Amino acid sequence: MFGKLLGHLSKDLGIDLGTSNTLVYSKDGGIVINEPSIVAVNTRTDQILSVGKDAKDMLGKTPPHIQITKPLSKGVISDFEVTEKMLKYFIDKVHTESFTFVPRPTIVIGVPLETTEVERKAIEDAALSAGARKVHLVENPMLAALGARLPLSESVGMMIVDIGGGTTEIAVMSLAGVVTWKSLDIAGEEMNKNIIQYARDQFNLLLGERIAERIKMRIGTAIEQDAPMEMEMRGRDLLTGLPKEIMVNDTQIRDALQRSVRTIIDNVKATLETTPPELVADIYERGIVLTGGGALLRGLDVLISRQAAIPVRVAEDPLTCVVRGAGLLLDNRELLADITLPSATEGSIV
């Protein structure tokens, strides 16, 4: 009874628990949190110092007793305790201006297609321990399709390529279900590593992860651009050990990203090859939709379209598609009940 009362006073939430970023959608306020999935922990006191943007600013700059942790890897929990604390921090942050002293919200969380029952249970347990009253787990491509305003429940084929931080998920859907799919470990973070490796191989330059990400976002491309772009690349010279700065252009970064981009395109084509012909006809007519942060790589939609011979478009605000889809489900309980994965936590109130 008391739990129900607290539930009514709490704000129901949709959460995109991503490898790189965690986004939270509140029923009243829309997207209220968009922070990196990073936590700074003081190992001497075992206390959390900061979460999100503040913790990301500390990357590569901490003394030995402060550990920067990414509690999610490939979209699943790698550090349960830190994930629970991070979720509790975000839930409490959403409720700071409400009258609820103990928030007990219903939460919809997106999970990767390839998650095992054990991994789903870890996500459920972390959310329940962080204060959730009910937890609904839904596959990420389903939420991305809803967030991109695709007719998920209709008997038409649609294809989503969701390029996140840790995973790329390629799914063909119809009638609120996934028909064929592929999940890859190659996504945004792997592209950052490609740039780091390229700098090491070509220039004997050791780059930090944040620098590599900034270069990818500023001048990363999948196809040749009309106007050349360049920016500075700063790091440590591996031969002298001293700081070094060089200028790199979009052609060089395109070379660095080439293998990852090629792998994604090859898997898009392989997924189409295993798709029933009726659904392929629908996809050819409606096109492939790109979501996730990786969809913002310049020219990626054009390159996939050329290679797959199918129209491709980037969803509006691709970074927030999954969390917006989770938010829409908070108002559509019938569809939520239809596409929620079976609870992996025995005895939980779901």
Image (cartoon, grey):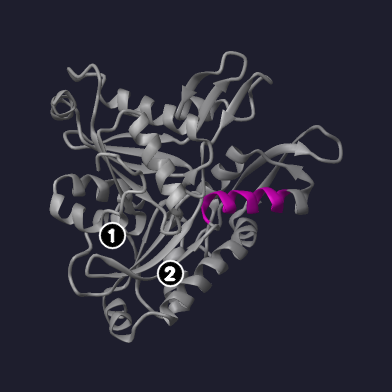
In the rendered image, which quarter contains the C terminus? top left
Q: Residues within 10 Å of mark 2 (few under 14, many from 20)?
A: some
Q: Residue at x 35, y 44 (%)?
A: 345
Given the image, on which type of amino acid does mark 1 rest? Ala
Is 57 on the left-hand or right-hand side of 204? Answer: left
The x, y position of residue 190, in whole percent, is 58, 53
**Quarter-of-image position of residue 123:** top left
Given the image, on which type of amino acid does mark 2 rest? Val
Give the label on residue 10, or none. none
Front-lying residue, 65 or 251:
65
Instruction: Please give the residue where the numbered disc 1 appears in the rendered image.
Output: 145
Front-lying residue, 167 or 240:
167
Is 142 on the left-hand or right-hand side of 196? Answer: left
Instruction: Please give the residue where the numbered disc 2 appears in the rendered image.
Output: 302
Question: Is residue 189 on the magenta stretch?
Answer: yes
User: What is the magenta range?
Assistant: 187-199
Q: Secondary structure at mark 2?
A: helix
| Separation of marks 2 and 1 at Cα, in angstroms | 20 Å
In the rendered image, which quarter contains the N terminus? top left
Q: Residue at x 44, y 78 (%)?
A: 308
The x, y position of residue 13, in whole percent, is 25, 37
